[in-house]
Image (tube, rainbow, N blue to C red):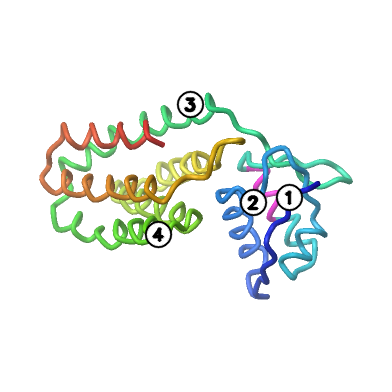
C-alpha cells in the first residue's frame, strides 16, 4: 500500500514554489518514500491544488536528482545509497574546506558575529526536532558563510550538493533530535573558530561536520 502523505493546503500565490517547498520537506522528512510512485493528481488533492503545479514541481525535483518521471504513471522517488551519500560528503568537503580556510584568513570578526542569528536558527530547529526546518536552516547557515566569497556559482553548486546530502537513506531510522542538536552545535563552534582565525580548528570542524553528515 502506498504510504500516505499528511494533507496540507497550499496558498494560491506562488503555488508551484510552495508545492516544491512542501515536496522538498516531505523528501527530507521521509514522507516521500524511496522507490514509491506518486501521481500528480493524488498529490494535488492532498495539497489542495491542481495536478499542474505538482507536476511542475516534480519535474524540478527530477532535475535535482530526487525523482524520476514515469510516463502515464507519475514520479518515482529515487533510492539513495550510503556510497552516494559518502561521495557527496567528499565533494562538499573538497569545495568548502579550502573556501572556509580562505575566508577565515580574510573576513573580520564582526562579520562572523553577524552570522550568529543563522546559527541560532539551526539550534532552535534542532531543539524542536523539526527535521525539515533544520534542513532549511542548515542550508541557510552554509549559504550565508559561502556568500562571503562573492562567488554566486560556488554558492549555487554548494547549495545543490547540500540539498542532495539531506535526503534520507532508505531503511535508516529517522534522525534523532539529539543528533540535530549536536550538528547545530558544530555551527557555533565553527563561528568561534572563524572569529578567532584558528585555522587548524576551522579545518577540523568542517571536515568532521561533513564526515558526520
Q: Residues within 10 Å of mark 4 (few under 14, many from 20)?
A: many
How far apart are the two marked residues, 2 and 1, measured between alpha carbons? 8 Å
62 inside magenta stretch: yes
The stretch of residues the image draws in magenta is 57-63
Which residue is depicted at the point 20% across and 54% down?
Answer: 112
Measured as percent of width and height from the top left, residue 31 is found at 64, 51
Point out which mark residue 125 bears: 4
Q: Earlier in the sequence, mark 3 or mark 2?
A: 2
Q: Quadrant of the C terminus?
A: top left
Pointer 2 with pointer 1, Cβ within 8 A: yes
Question: Can you identify the residue that label 1 sits on?
Answer: 3
Residues tagged 3 and 4 counted as in contact (Cβ below 8 A): no
Question: Chief secondary structure of the magenta span?
Answer: helix
Dot 1 alpha-carbon crowd within 10 angstroms: few under 14, some 14 to 19, many 20 or more:
few
In the structure shown, which secondary structural element does the residue marked by tag 4 occupy?
A: helix
Distance from label 3 to label 2 (Cα)?
24 Å
Left or right: 166 in relation to 142: right
Q: Give the number of the disc on residue 15.
A: none
- Looking at the image, is mark 4 or mark 1 earlier in the sequence? 1
- Tag 4 or tag 3, which sits nearer the N-term? 3
Amino acid at each position: 500500500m502506498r504510504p500516505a502523505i499528511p494533507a496540507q493546503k497550499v496558498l494560491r500565490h506562488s503555488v508551484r514554489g510552495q508545492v516544491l517547498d512542501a515536496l522538498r520537506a516531505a523528501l527530507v522528512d521521509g514522507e516521500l518514500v524511496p522507490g514509491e510512485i506518486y501521481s500528480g493528481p493524488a498529490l494535488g488533492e492532498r495539497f489542495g491544488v491542481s495536478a499542474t503545479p505538482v507536476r511542475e514541481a516534480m519535474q524540478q525535483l527530477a532535475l535535482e536528482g530526487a525523482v524520476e518521471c514515469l510516463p502515464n504513471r507519475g514520479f518515482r522517488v529515487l533510492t539513495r545509497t550510503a556510497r552516494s551519500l559518502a561521495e557527496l560528503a567528499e565533494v562538499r568537503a573538497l569545495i568548502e574546506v579550502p573556501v572556509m580556510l580562505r575566508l577565515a584568513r580574510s573576513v573580520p570578526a564582526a562579520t562572523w558575529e553577524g552570522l550568529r542569528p543563522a546559527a541560532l536558527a539551526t539550534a532552535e530547529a534542532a531543539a524542536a526536532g523539526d527535521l525539515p526546518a533544520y534542513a532549511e536552516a542548515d542550508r541557510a547557515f552554509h549559504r550565508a558563510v559561502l556568500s562571503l566569497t562573492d562567488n554566486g556559482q560556488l554558492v549555487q553548486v554548494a547549495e545543490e550538493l547540500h540539498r542532495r546530502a539531506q535526503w534520507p537513506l532508505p531503511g535508516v531510522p529517522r534522525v534523532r533530535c539529539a543528533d540535530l542538536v549536536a550538528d547545530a552545535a558544530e555551527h557555533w563552534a565553527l563561528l568561534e573558530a572563524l572569529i578567532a582565525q584558528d585555522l587548524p580548528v576551522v579545518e577540523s570542524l568542517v571536515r568532521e561536520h561533513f564526515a558526520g553528515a
